[in-house]
Amino acid sequence: MSGVANPVRGEAAVRVSGEMLVLRPSFAALVAAEGELGPLFALVERAAEGRLALVEMVALFWHCLRDRPAGLTREALGEAVAAQGLTAVVPALKVLIGQIVAGR
C-alpha cells in the first residue's frame, strides 16, 4: 500500500517500482533494526562519517516500512534503492536518522 509520508510523525517516503512507500521509524521498527544492525547510535555515527553500507540502509528502510506491499521482498527493495541511486534515497535516510537522534 502506498501513501503520503506524514512529516509530523517523522515519516519519509521512497519510490519502489513506481510506488511511493512510507517509512515510519516507530519504536518497534527501530528495535527490530537495532536487533539486526547493532546499536542505532553507532549506525548514526557511521552515516555521519559516510561509512553506512548500502545493506544497512536497506535494512533500516525494510524495518521502517509502514505498509509493506504484498510480494515486496527485501531484495527488491534493495534493487530499487540501488537502481535509483543514493541521491534519490538520501533524503529519506536523513529523515530517519534525524528521528533516531531527536526522537518524537
Image: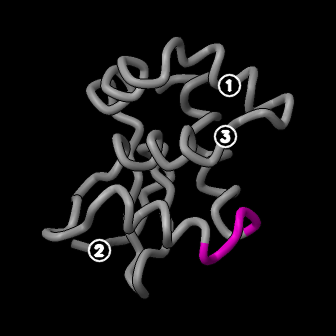
Q: Secondary structure at mark 3?
A: loop
Residue type at mark 1: give it.
Val
Q: Write the residue at 70% across / 56% down.
A: 90
Q: Which of the two discs, 1 and 2, labels the residue nearer the N terminus?
A: 2
Q: Which of the two discs, 3 and 2, labels the residue nearer the N terminus?
A: 2
Residue 96 position by quadrant:
top right
In the rendering, at what x and y percent does residue 24 appear? 38, 46
Q: Which residues are magenta?
A: 83-87
In the rendering, at what x and y percent does residue 74 appear? 34, 56
The vertical placement of 20 against 12, above or below, is below
Cβ atoms under marks 3 and 2 closer than 8 Å: no
Task: Tell me: 64 left or right of 57.
Answer: left
Name the residue that disc number 3 marks.
53
- Inter-mark Cα distance, 3 to 1: 12 Å
In the rendering, at what x and y percent does residue 45 appear? 75, 20
Name the residue that disc number 1 marks.
44
Residue type at mark 3: give it.
Ala
The vertical placement of 102 against 94, above or below, is above
- Inter-mark Cα distance, 3 to 2: 26 Å
Along the line of sight, which residue is nearer the eye, 88 or 51? 51
Along the line of sight, which residue is nearer the eye, 88 or 26? 88
Residue at the extreme left: 70
Name the residue that disc number 2 marks.
2
- Inter-mark Cα distance, 1 to 2: 27 Å
Secondary structure mostly seen in magenta is helix
Residue 92 position by quadrant:
bottom right
